[in-house]
Amino acid sequence: MTTGAEPATPTRALAAKFYSFDRRLALLALGMFAIGTDSFVIAGILGEIARDFDVSIAAAGQLITTYALSYAIFTPITAVAMANWPRQRVLLTGILIFVVGNLVAGFGASFALVLIGRCISGLGAAIFAPMASATAAAMVGDKNRASALAVMMIALSAATAFGAPIGTVIGALLSWHYTFVLIAVIGMFVAIGVAVLVECGETTQKLSLRMRLRPIQDRRILAVLFTTFVVLCGLYVTYTYIAVIFDRATRGDGVALAVLISILGIAGTVGSIVSGHLTDRIGSRIVINVSLVALALNFAWLPLTSANFASAIVAVIIWGICGWGVVIPQQHRLIGLAPEYAPILLSLYAMAVYGGTSVAGVVGAVASVAIGYHQLPLVGAALIACGLVVSEYATWTIKRDGERLNKVADLDS
């Protein structure tokens, strides 16, 4: 019999490390799942909200625009303001604001209050999501960075596969108010987990103001970010109005729409897993280019394929795999330019994502008047094709400029 504490063996220490790692990564992924559900579920309950407040579908679609615009505006601001905060404080602040926003939206008695709730939720997501991705990337070595980011993206795509469809069904069978309450409950669970599992002492790297601003002066980074902006705008021109674009296939049935959204999410989960693996093995360029070409062609055919449920299933499978297949190699490419800037770069990436999303809502509303909702995917296809051109320009600038952005320490000394 031994007395006192047993000495820590290398095997025991390694097991403890992986046990802690898995719990924390799962927690961060759950937070991303909640944020993803909040982002994607609106498209499925758009009709119910529009009817309750007697507004048009295009007006209700601005709930997505408000959330995305809030996310895009606040992401760089909060990233700089909270750059030297402990990780736990940043994550906890973000998820609690997110919870409050969803409760305001869920109990909102007017369309204006729901809009305010969406704005608050966007602020919370802008704080939490970039830090969650940066924390996940920091947990692993450079060799497995894309795989760690893939876990975060799998959580987001799982939100499309499960969270958004469940929220859509709840909205169709009960009320859209309960959808937001469910998201708030998930957020509170994540907040409790962050308080328990994330250590207070962990902080991001302290960077001078000059170093924080330096990424936006690099044209390679700007080209990658603009690629993301244009592609996401193309994707969300279609996704924002998915309920009316696919109404011929679903015949207006909320459950049938939930099935399509679920298939889209499951395909996105597959795309996240495969693209993370391929990016680690063959690099980002091929994965990005193949995905964008397939997406553009798929969206060009959507006005026809969205008219029938069977062809709609095939279309959303391609959409899910290739749409989510772009996300991870884009993040991997961005962080690879300057790993030490990961939190700042991921914040800028999130700004590009939600900037494109917010613009998409407006572009879709305007374009729908001119060409109708069923033709909107053609606008998305054109934007995705433009994204391919910008992506190739990004590749050219990365090869030409060569030097990594993070080799700037001497400039600030």
Image (tube, helix red, strand yellow):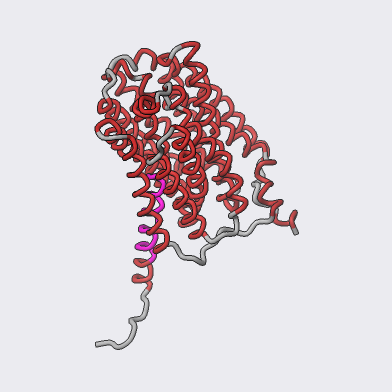
> In the image, what residue occupies the spot 40% across and 15% down?
374
Above/below status of 147 relative to 255: below
- Can you say which quadrant of the picture contains the N terminus? bottom left
Along the line of sight, the residue nearer the viewer: 240 or 389: 240
Looking at the rendered structure, the number of numbered marks drawn on it comes to 0
Which quarter of the figure has residue 242?
A: top left
Q: Does the magenta stretch include residue 202?
A: no
Above/below status of 314 relative to 372: below
Q: Does the magenta stretch include residue 29?
A: yes
Q: Give the range drawn in magenta.
A: 17-34
Magenta region, main secondary structure: helix
Locate residue 10, reporting x and y percent: 38, 72
Query: Does 401 sit left or right of 145 as displayed?
Result: right
- Can you say which quadrant of the picture contains the C terminus? bottom right
Judge whether residue 408 can be spotted in this image.
yes
Above/below status of 312 relative to 331: above
Along the line of sight, the residue nearer the viewer: 71 or 3: 71
Locate residue 145, reporting x and y percent: 47, 49
Which quarter of the figure has residue 207?
A: bottom right
Judge whether residue 294 can be spotted in this image.
no
Query: Does 330 sit left or right of 406 as displayed?
Result: left
> In the image, what residue occupies the spot 55% across and 23% down?
386
Along the line of sight, the residue nearer the viewer: 202 or 143: 202
Spot the residue most to the front.
109
> In the image, what residue occupies the spot 45% across and 17% down?
376
